[in-house]
Image (cartoon, coloured by chain):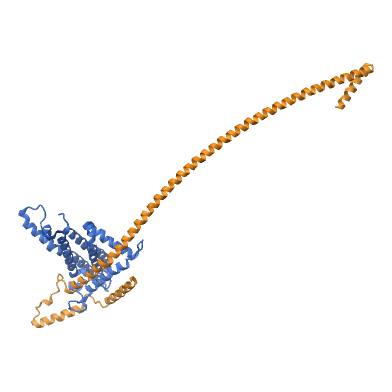
Chain colours: A orange, B blue
């Protein structure tokens, strides 16, 4: 529909533009010729050169054909604009305004929704942070508690081990003293037996004791 | 000699020969051709501009700007929201006048239809009927009293005031409405012809041909100026029509 109308309009433009080619200059031969002919005729009829037609046309008197065509032209423009041009344009512009308004409203609604979601996310994030802080604190407290327990237990174990080691040492020492005492006793008896069994001179006794002691030392 | 350059008589720069129907009531001359172009261009503008693109470009942009200009800048500006019903009429006035005016600077044609009194007078009379019609529709039989009797005038002065108001609103107003458009466009046309004739007279083998660029610059300048005048006078005529309609139908004085 629009394409056909545009084609028609283009043809009309070409026709009107072509007609410009026939436009003659302002010194308009046709009109002047026509006016001259009329004037000559009037002068001949009046048998005088003193006739009205020799005066220039009054520029304040409208030409009837221009008034008529002006009315026709204006009526076409008005009819077109009132029935087709303006309502169509207005409808298109109103539809666009409505569409833009609708889009703006939708965008506003989406923005509000997004803001709500953002608030919700922020609240959730704050909760999560709070929760994580709580968990970390609990873990820290638990770790502290475990460490204290372990430390206490280790200290207790160490004390116990130390006590046990001391006891073992004391026991071993007592045992060693007892053993040594028995050994010394045996040595003394042995030495005494040697001394009693062979009454030798001082040097021999001493050599015997020394030899005995060495033999005991070698046995150990 | 330059001083002997012949300036064409007024009738030679405003009267145009007939293309058809010489001397007939339906005679078609250059002025009628300009009317035709104005009709065509208005239809073209609103046909090509009637697109539904969200972001207007080209003809659509121009047409929408024009609609908003007349609607908001003239109708609503002069008559408020009630003026919207007159938008098609005011748009018709504006575009018909503007497109017929602009042919003053269109090569080959170079003649504004409003430089002949027929068109301004016809449009002023149409506007006259419309604004008085709007007054009668708004006030009924009381329109004459509304138009002629300003409130608060002493009774003794009433005959004089009524006479002045009658002459002003019913006789001078359409005349001034006509002449404002007609005289402005005719003056512009004469100016362009004057500078063109001067330029033409100076294009000669004589020494004073060196001055030819001066009037030619005048032609260029006044051509641009007349584009502005074409728009301005179309706007003023349409705006005044809106003001007259508003004054006629207004319930305030």
Whether residue A95 is visible here, answered yes or no, is yes
Q: Residue A218 in the image: x percent, y percent?
A: 87, 27
* Quadrant position of residue A26: bottom left
Percent x, y of residue A207: 91, 20
Q: Which one is nearer the viewer's eye here, A52 or A102?
A: A102
Q: Tell me if A180 is positioned left or right of B243 in this view.
A: right
Q: Is residue B107 left or right of residue B135?
A: right
A31 and B207: which one is in front? A31
From the top left corner, tell me how far across and down residue A161 is, in percent: 69, 29
Q: Vertical placement of B248 versus A70: above or below? A: above
Give the image quarter of residue B126: bottom left
**In the rendered view, would you say A23 is above or below A167?**
below
Q: Between residues B59 and A219, which one lies in front from this camera angle?
A: A219
The residue under the point 64% across, 31% down is: A153
The number of discs equals: 0
Q: Is residue A171 left or right of residue B216?
A: right
**Res. B208 visible in picture:** no
Which quadrant holds the N terminus of chain A? Answer: bottom left
Identify the residue at the far left of this view: B156
The image quadrant where one finds the C terminus of chain A is top right
What is the quadrant of residue A89 in the picture? bottom left
Query: Does residue A121 appear left or right of residue A75 in this picture?
Result: right
Q: Picture coordinates of residue A22 (x, y %)?
A: 26, 78
């Amino acid at each position: 529909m629009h394409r056909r109308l545009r084609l028609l309009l283009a043809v009309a433009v070409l026709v009107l533009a072509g007609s410009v080619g026939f436009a003659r200059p302002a010194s308009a031969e046709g009109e002047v010729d026509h006016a001259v002919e009329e004037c000559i005729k009037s002068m001949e009829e009046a048998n005088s050169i003193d006739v009205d037609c020799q005066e220039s046309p009054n520029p304040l008197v409208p030409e009837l054909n221009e008034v008529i065509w002006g009315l026709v032209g204006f009526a076409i423009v008005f009819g077109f604009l009132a029935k087709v041009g303006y309502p169509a344009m207005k409808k298109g512009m109103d539809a666009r305004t409505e569409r833009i308004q609708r889009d703006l409203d939708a965008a506003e609604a989406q923005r509000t929704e997004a803001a709500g979601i953002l608030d919700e996310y922020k609240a959730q994030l704050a909760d999560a942070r709070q929760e994580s802080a709580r968990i970390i604190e609990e873990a820290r407290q638990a770790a502290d508690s475990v460490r204290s327990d372990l430390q206490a237990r280790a200290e207790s174990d160490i004390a116990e081990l130390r006590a046990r080691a001391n006891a073992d040492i004391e026991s071993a020492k007592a045992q060693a003293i007892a053993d040594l005492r028995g050994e010394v006793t045996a040595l003394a008896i042995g030495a005494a037996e040697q001394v009693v069994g062979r009454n030798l001179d001082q040097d021999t006794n001493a050599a015997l004791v020394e030899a005995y002691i060495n033999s005991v030392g070698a046995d150990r | 000699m330059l001083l002997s350059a012949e300036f064409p008589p007024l009738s030679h720069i405003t009267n145009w020969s007939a293309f058809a129907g010489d001397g007939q009531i339906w005679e078609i001359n250059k002025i009628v051709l300009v009317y035709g172009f104005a009709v065509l261009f208005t239809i073209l503008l609103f046909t090509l501009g009637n697109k539904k693109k969200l972001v207007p470009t080209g003809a659509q942009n121009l047409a929408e700007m024009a609609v908003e200009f007349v609607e908001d800048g003239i109708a609503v500006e002069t008559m408020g929201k009630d003026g919207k019903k007159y938008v098609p009429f005011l748009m018709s006035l504006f575009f018909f006048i503007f497109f017929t005016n602009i042919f003053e600077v269109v090569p080959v044609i170079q003649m504004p239809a409003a430089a002949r009194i027929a068109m301004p007078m016809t449009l002023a009379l149409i506007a006259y009927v419309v604004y008085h019609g709007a007054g009668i529709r708004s006030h009924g039989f009381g329109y004459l009293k509304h138009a002629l009797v300003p409130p608060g005038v002493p009774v003794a002065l009433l005959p004089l005031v009524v006479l002045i108001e009658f002459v002003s609103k019913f006789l001078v107003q359409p005349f001034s409405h006509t002449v404002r458009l007609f005289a402005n466009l005719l003056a512009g046309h004469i100016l362009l012809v004057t500078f063109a004739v001067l330029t033409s007279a100076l294009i000669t083998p004589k020494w004073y041909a060196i001055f030819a660029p001066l009037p030619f610059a005048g032609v260029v300048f006044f051509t641009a100026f007349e584009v502005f005048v074409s728009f301005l006078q179309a706007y003023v005529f349409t705006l005044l029509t809106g003001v007259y309609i508003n004054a006629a139908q207004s319930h305030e004085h």
